[in-house]
Image (cartoon, rainbow, N blue to C red):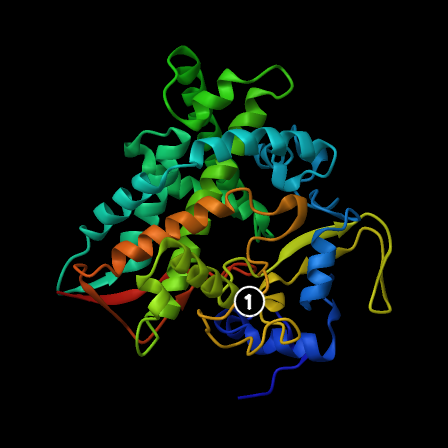
């Protein structure tokens, strides 16, 4: 195998998608503030990534040349949606809207332990004994989509459709390769948005115990229906994508162990600590993109204003200067805070819910009376730069 070098970093390279970690190590060692000729900077060390995540000079707004830039709001649904999302806003526009959403979301997702445990147990019962099962499509997606639908207020029958829309929604966060795909994205977002708007109208007339009812009852004119609907879409997509990918990445690690680690059979706190170690080691979000508002100096290099900067979350999470034996799975160790959920004002709003759902899914899958899961030799990673998501996780289910 050819030795990785900093100059060999190609996010779209199938070899990088299959195993990006040797390249990340080369970047940290040789060129931690790396200029890539394709037109972006890549920051790879923990200390620098964390600082940039908290630095207001690094903007979350869409790049000036992007199809989803604000100038295209009247032309494309995708651009209108993107510019309503807290994920693409900077302070002060971001601050108040995020705080309002967070208050309602956190209140609604608290004390959901029993609901998530019941959904996980029910999802386990659908696994077919004696055969091969793809845990992504047959467990993780159905479980995560049913859970977020219950929290937000989508009817349970909507779960498969919401999962498909949510998968499309994530294309907003990546380069769109061609016009046909952009057209499909706009069609999907239009349908998803209209579905949420219709639910908002229903909840205004007849509220129930869900987040959509909470939000529409507390709208005071400072946010529009489209802003609320689009951020509900974001919460749905994050609630499915982050749980699906985080859970299956955890499973891919656990099923490779000679014996299952003790914390898996301990308290909820023990399992949560184990989940964090898995997410550090196999971070579903590999990096976050930013645009510099002004020139920035990092390690003696000047990053000019309006530059694209990729903040390497997954690389930072294996930085040997911060994590001892950084490439090793050590669930009993006390580790520094990983960056899988980001940091600062744009840290994943639903990170506590994601952890909670993964904990209950693992407890159900590895319960004493649960069927035994035997991993198949190959893992199939989705060919999507920036995401380390399993496309398939095949296991044999034994009684």
Quadrant that contains the C terminus: bottom left
* In the foreground, 300 or 7: 300
**How many marks overall?**
1
Q: Is residue 180 above or below residue 258?
A: above
Judge the density around disc 1: few (<14), some (14-19), many (≥20) Cα neighbours within 10 Å: some
Residue 299 % position (x, y) = 82, 69
Residue 262 % position (x, y) = 34, 69
* In the foreground, 371 or 383: 371
Q: Is residue 365 above or below residue 293?
A: below
Q: Quadrant of residue 101?
A: top right
Residue indicated by mark 1: 335
At 39% across and 69% down in the image, what residue appears?
253
Q: Is residue 300 above or below residue 57?
A: below
Q: Is residue 321 above or below residue 178?
A: below
Residue 22 % position (x, y) = 58, 78
From the viewer's perspective, tell me whether residue 191 is left or right of residue 218: left
* In the foreground, 99 or 311: 99
Is residue 340 at least partly visible in the picture? yes
Q: Quadrant of residue 149?
A: top left
Is residue 75 at least partly visible in the picture? no
At 32% across and 43% down in the image, what residue appears?
116
Residue 1 % position (x, y) = 53, 88
């Amino acid at each position: 195998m050819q030795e990785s070098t900093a100059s060999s970093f190609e996010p779209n390279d199938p070899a990088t998608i299959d195993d990006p970690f040797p390249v990340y190590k080369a970047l940290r060692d040789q060129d931690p503030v790396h200029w890539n000729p394709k037109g972006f900077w890549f920051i790879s060390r923990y200390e620098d990534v964390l600082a940039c995540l908290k630095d207001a000079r690094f903007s979350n707004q869409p790049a000036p040349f992007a199809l989803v830039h604000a100038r295209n709001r009247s032309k494309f649904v995708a651009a209108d949606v993107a510019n309503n999302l807290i994920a693409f806003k900077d302070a002060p526009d971001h601050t108040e809207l995020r705080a309002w959403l967070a208050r309602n979301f956190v209140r609604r997702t608290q004390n959901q332990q029993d609901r998530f445990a019941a959904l996980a147990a029910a999802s386990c019962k659908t696994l077919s004994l004696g055969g091969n099962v793809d845990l992504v499509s047959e467990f993780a997606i159905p479980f995560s989509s049913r859970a977020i639908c219950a929290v937000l207020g989508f009817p349970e029958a909507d779960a498969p459709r919401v999962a498909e829309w949510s998968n499309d929604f994530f294309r907003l966060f990546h380069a769109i390769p061609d016009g046909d795909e952009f057209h499909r994205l706009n069609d999907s977002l239009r349908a998803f948005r209209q579905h949420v708007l219709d639910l908002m109208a229903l909840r205004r007339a007849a509220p129930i115990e869900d987040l959509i009812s909470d939000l529409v009852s507390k709208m005071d004119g400072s946010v529009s229906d489209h802003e609320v609907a689009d951020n509900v879409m974001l919460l749905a997509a994050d609630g499915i994508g982050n749980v699906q990918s985080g859970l299956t990445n955890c499973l891919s690690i656990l099923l490779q162990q000679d014996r299952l680690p003790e914390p898996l059979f301990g308290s909820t706190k023990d399992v949560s600590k184990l989940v964090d170690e898995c997410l550090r080691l196999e971070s579903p979000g590999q990096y976050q993109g930013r645009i510099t508002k002004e020139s920035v100096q990092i390690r003696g290099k000047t990053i000019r204003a309006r530059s694209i900067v990729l903040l390497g979350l997954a690389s930072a999470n294996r930085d040997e200067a911060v994590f001892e034996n950084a490439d090793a799975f050590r669930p009993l160790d006390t580790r520094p805070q990983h960056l899988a959920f980001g940091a600062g004002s744009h840290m994943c709003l639903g990170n506590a819910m994601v952890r909670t759902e993964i904990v209950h899914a693992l407890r159900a899958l590895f319960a004493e009376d649960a069927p035994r899961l035997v991993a198949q030799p190959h893992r199939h990673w989705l060919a999507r730069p920036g995401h380390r998501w399993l496309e398939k996780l095949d296991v044999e289910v034994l009684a």
